[in-house]
Image: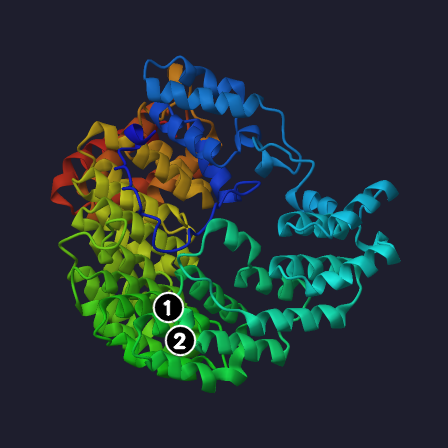
Amino acid sequence: MAAILGITQVPAGAQEYFPSPGDKTSPRPLPWEESGLRAALADASLEVRSQAVFHITHNRWARLLLTAKDLEPLLQSPNEEIKKQAVEAQAQLSATPAPGGAESAGKKHDPSPPESAEAAQKAPVEIAPERVKELLTQLHDPHFYDRDHAVKALGRAGTLATEEMVSALVPMLQDPSLRVVCSAALALRDMGREEAACREALLRLLKAYKPLPEETGFLESLGAFSLDEIFYVMTAADLESSPEFISQIVRQLKDPLLFMRSEYTRSAVSSFVQGMGPKISPYLKDLLPLLQDANPNVQLHAMYALLDVGDEAAPTVARALLPLFTSTDDHVRYLTANYCYALGPAAAPVVVPALLPFLRKTNDASRLRAIISLGRLGPSAAPAARELLAVLDHPDTEPVGHQGGFSQHAAAEALGQLGPGVEPLVVPALVQHFKDGDAMLGFSILRAFECMGAAAAPLAIPAALPLLQSTDGQIKVWACETIRLWGNFQRDPAWQCAALAGATAVTKEEDLPYLRYSLYLWSGHDPELLLSVRWLGHPAAPPMPAGGAALSAAEQQSVLHMLHTLWAHSAKYPALRQEMAARIADFAQSITTAPDEKVVELLKKMDELLKADTIKETQPASAKARSTVQRALTRG
C-alpha cells in the first residue's frame, strides 16, 4: 500500500524512544469518519476508493462499511496493489465475527486466558496417601535436589495438607541446603501455616547470605541459593516491608563485598530495594551516601535502588544525584541521564535543569538519553521546550544510541509529551520541520501530534495547509497525515478551500488519489464540504450525472450553495478559482429546463460573483462561466 500512498518507509527503530500511542483501532468509526469514507468509496477513481478500503481494513471496519459490490471493481483492477488491498478487505468482510464485537474481528478467542491457567496450577491438590508416604521418605534423601523436589510436591497440597505433612515440613526450615529452606517456607505459606517459623528462617537466611564467588561450580551453586529466591519468598509471604527485613537488605546493599561479586547479585539487591518504593524512605540516610562512593558500580546500583522512592522523597534523591550528572565517568553520566525520569514529576524542578546541558552536545549518546528522559517526565518538563526545539535546529551528524537513532527525532517526540502549555510555541515549529525531508523525523512529528491530541489541531492545521501545495510529494503526505488526525472539525470553508487548492496544485498524477481521499475524510463533518470534494480538486470524472441526466432541484441548490460559499475563499488560489469557474459553467450548461425559484436566486448571486471577479488570471474563465449562467437564467 505504501507504493500507492507514496509514503517513504519508516526506518527501523523509529519507535525506540517513547511508548507508542497505542493501537487506535475503534469498534466503530466516528460519524465524520464514516461520512468521509462512504463518500470516498463513491468516487470515480479506483485509486481513491482503494485508499478508503485500506483505511477501513486497517481499522477492521469492513463488516460495517463495505459490501462485496464495493470491492468488485477493485478486484478487477490491473493495478496489483489495488487488487491486493481489495482481497484483504474481502477476507475480512467474509470472516466470521469474533466474540466481543468488530474490534475483536480476526483475533482468535482464547477460552483459557493465562490467569486461569495460573490459578489452576496454584489450586490445592489432594495427594494420595501412598504418594504422601513416598514424599515424606524423600525428605530425608542425602541429595538436596531430591529433598527440594519432595518439599515442593508436598506444598502443592496447599490448604488440603494434613497435620502429618505440616509437621514434616517444619524441620525443613533448618535444612543445610538454603534452597530447600526457601521451598519449605513457600510450601508452608501455601498451607497457611507456621508464619512465625517461616519469618525466622528467612531472616536467618538473609543475615547469613554471602554472594557466591564468580568461580563457584555449577553443582555447588545448585545447592546454594540466590538473593532472588529469598526476595521471592519474602514477597510471597508478605514479609518484605518488615523493618527487620528492610534493614538486612540495606545492609546487603552497603556491603562492599557485594560489589566485588557478580552483576546479577548487585542487580537483584538494587532491583528489590527499588521495588519496595516509598517504604525505603526511612533508610535514605544509609543509602544516599552510596551515591558518592568512589566505585562507579556502587553509585549506579544505589541510584537504581532509589528510583521509586515516591513523591515525598524524590526531590531529596534528585539533589543527591546531581554530582552523577557531571561525573567524569561517561557511563555514570549516560545512565543517570537515562534513568532519572523514573523519579517522577516531583523531582522535575531538580532533574530538568540538570538534563539541559546534555542537549547542547551533538553526537553524544547522553544527549539522546536526556531527551528521552525529558519526554517521559511529561508536562513537568515543559520548561525544557525551547531547548528541545533548539535540538531540531542543531541535529546530530552521526548516529547515536544502540539503534543508531538521532537526537533530533527523539526531541520531536519529547515535545509531544510536554502538555498543552507549550503547544503555541511547539506546534508551528514542528510543522516547519516537515520541510527537512527526513522520513524518520516526519514520522516522529506525527507521533508528537497524535500524543498532543485535538488541542493541537487549531495550531497544526493552519501551519500544515500551505504544505499541501508543495511540489514534494512526501511533504504533502506528512501534511495530509497531520490534518487527517482531526479532520475539518471546525467546518471551515476557508480551510476546505486551501485543502482543495492543494489538490489543484498537484504536479504528479500519483499524488492525487491519496490527497483526494484525505479531502473526503477531512470533510466528513459537513455534507456541503463533502460535496465540494466531489465537484472540485481534479475529480477523476466529471461530477455531472452520467448519460446527460439532470440534477434534481435539491441537488442544484446544494451544488450552487456550495460553489457560492467557497468562491470568496478561492481568491488566494487562482488555479482553484479557474476550476470552480469551469464547474459553474458545466453546471449551468446542464440546466435545460426552467429552474425553480431558489435555483434562480442562487444563479443570480453566482452571476454577481463572476461579474465582480478581480483576479486577472481567472477573469476569462469567470466571463465564460457567466455567459452560461445567464443563458440558464433566461430559461427561468
Residue 618 image position (x, y, % from top left): 16, 39
Quarter residue 258 falls in: bottom left
> Where residue 559 sits: x, y (%)?
39, 35
Residue 189 picture location, percent across and down: 74, 61
Could you tell me the amino acid type at mark 1? Met
Q: Residue at x 22, y 47 (%)?
A: 467
In the image, 235: left or right of 500?
Answer: right
Do labels 1 and 2 touch, CB within 8 Å? Answer: yes
Q: CA distance from mark 1 to mark 2?
A: 7 Å
Q: Identify residue for label 2.
A: 256
Does residue 309 appear anywhere in the picture?
no
For the point 49% across and 68% down, the residue is: 210
> Does 146 sit above or below residue 453?
above
In x, y percent, where is residue 416?
35, 60
Query: Which circle marks residue 260 in the picture?
Result: 1
Q: Amino acid at mark 2?
A: Pro
The answer to which of 340 and 54 lies nearer the viewer is 340
